[in-house]
Image (cartoon, rainbow, N blue to C red):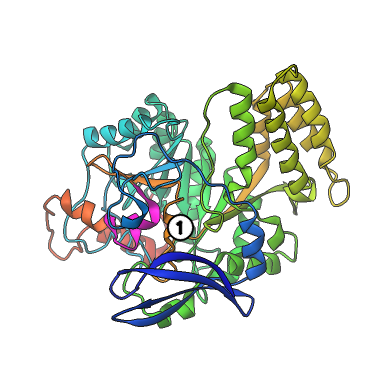
Amino acid sequence: MLVKKTKSLCPACKRVLDATIVEEDNKIWLERTCPNHGFIKSLYWSDSRMYHRFQEYEAVGTGIEEPVLQGEPDTCPQNCGLCSGHHSATLLANIDVTNRCNLNCDFCFANARACGFIYEPDFDEIVGMMKNLRNERPVPPPAVQFSGGEPTMRDDLPDLIREAKALGFSQVQIASNGIRLAQDLSQVQQLKDAGLSTIYLHFDGISKETNPFLATSKKAISNCAQVGMGVVLVPTVIHGRNDQEVGAIIRFAAENIGVIRGVNFQPVAFTGAASADDVAKERVTIPDLTANIETQTGGALRQDDFYPIPCVAPFTHLVEEYTGKPQVAFTAHQHCGAATYIFVNGNEIVPVNRMIDVEKFLQSVDHMAMTLARGGSVSKYRALLEGVKDIHTSLKRGESGKAGEIWRLIATTLIKQNYDALREFHWNALFIGTMHFMDDYNYDLDRVQRCCIHYATPDGRMIPFCTYNSGPVYREKIWKQYAKPLPQKSGETPGIESSTIETAVLSDVPPS
């Protein structure tokens, strides 16, 4: 059965092709035919029911006011960065600050190993990229993440964090493997003092078989706990390698909720030289992941507890109507990711939708926004009071005794305008989410044009995540364009610190 038409790529030659998304055997497939490589059929989502449920939350944005490029959808993705055919503004900006790394992971989509050159923009170039991002209109991105490579390889990382905060980024993150954070408590303190908000820590499992750096990761987490630095665990999930531990990873996060703020699972994207057989054997879709989570948590966290990113669009509309100012819009494609919050009570985890009827709650928020939009004689304060009464009906009283806490949080936030309540909610809840970044096998241009995670580049562009790392692979082009000569040391792999690899992999004991 035809679900919709789109455009995709040939995995072999990267040619842009007309494509169809079809439903067959309760799964969703992406089909296209290349003149040179024939018919190609790739798994898109492994559960058609979940696909259609997420489709109901579609929210298309309006892009940015002054696109860097004046391209059109017909040229996508060959001329990217951002163009007038892009529908989402930047929600999270990534900046590659180096391609140097002290690990050598075979599934790394950054291809940081064996580049043969150094990509490392200088301080002023990175500041220029951040200024360019903050000039984005109608709303500048609120968050920036320094990535690579391994960002902690840069000695000026604290200075970059300070500059990001000074420029107005409310959230500043780094994506790290944690090796240097485990080795040096003082570095974690320096990053915290500079204004770092969160460390996105690569964390693939809770056993030596799935995570050879487990002791290093735990030491990094311990050091972060000592200085009060929040951590989000980021597991790359590969079928047959570590997908049997996704439930255990969530339990580990819950046991360490004092420092761990969430888990952001990333099903593997085949951006390297993967074969069709590799993809068939190792592919994990969002429904696969959430089904495994349900099974491995004994139903404590169910597949239906997860919602797509644009489900929060009514909140954006409400705040815009109340303040009269444009707000950051969560208009990512509805099939890019999924998320929920869980409350941790001892050994018990309770998803937020066991306390709230999420659909009724979102409908109530949307109704409040429409009431404010109509205006007239109804004051903003009265509209909020009526809306809060309406929201009260969405609270559940069955599976959890925490409905009262949620009610107090909503009332305090909306009526008293006390946003400390939201901060309290975040610190007492654990975010569980997933983003399935695309590769050449499941590439959907509709998703590219709705991406809200963009890479800033030295030439002034903002490039969607999945175009930067797959398809045309702008990462390699940008890195090579701004490459610097690599100083070679005898017996050392380019971009790799051999001594650190030996310490982390062979002994898994962080240096003192």
Position of residue 340 measured from the top left corner of the image (x, y, whole percent): 65, 51
- Residues 314 and 34: in front is 34
**199 relative position to 147: left or right:** right
Question: Residue sitting at 74 percent across and 32 percent down?
Answer: 410
Position of residue 207 measured from the top left corner of the image (x, y, whole percent): 54, 67
Question: Residue sitting at 73 percent across and 42 percent down?
Answer: 363
Does 342 lie within the magenta span? no
- Residues 260 and 146: in front is 146
Q: Quadrant of residue 164?
A: top left
What is the residue that sits farthest to the right in this orientation?
Answer: 398
Is the residue 383 above or below the residue 23 in the image?
above
Q: Quadrant of residue 466?
A: bottom left
Q: Does residue 345 appear in the picture of this structure?
A: no
Give the secondary structure at mark 1: helix
Q: Does residue 168 appear in the picture of this structure?
A: yes
Question: Residue sitting at 31 percent across and 53 percent down?
Answer: 149
**287 relative position to 7: left or right:** right
Question: Residue sitting at 22 percent across and 46 percent down?
Answer: 120
Mark 1 surroundings within 10 Å by alpha-carbon count, few (fewer than 14), some (14 through 19), many (20 or more)? some
Residue corresponding to mark 1: 446
**114 relative position to 38: left or right:** left
- Residues 247 and 256: in front is 247
The mark total stands at 1
Magenta residues (range): 463-474
Position of residue 37 measured from the top left corner of the image (x, y, whole percent): 32, 82
Identity, as a three-letter code, of the amino acid under mark 1: Asp
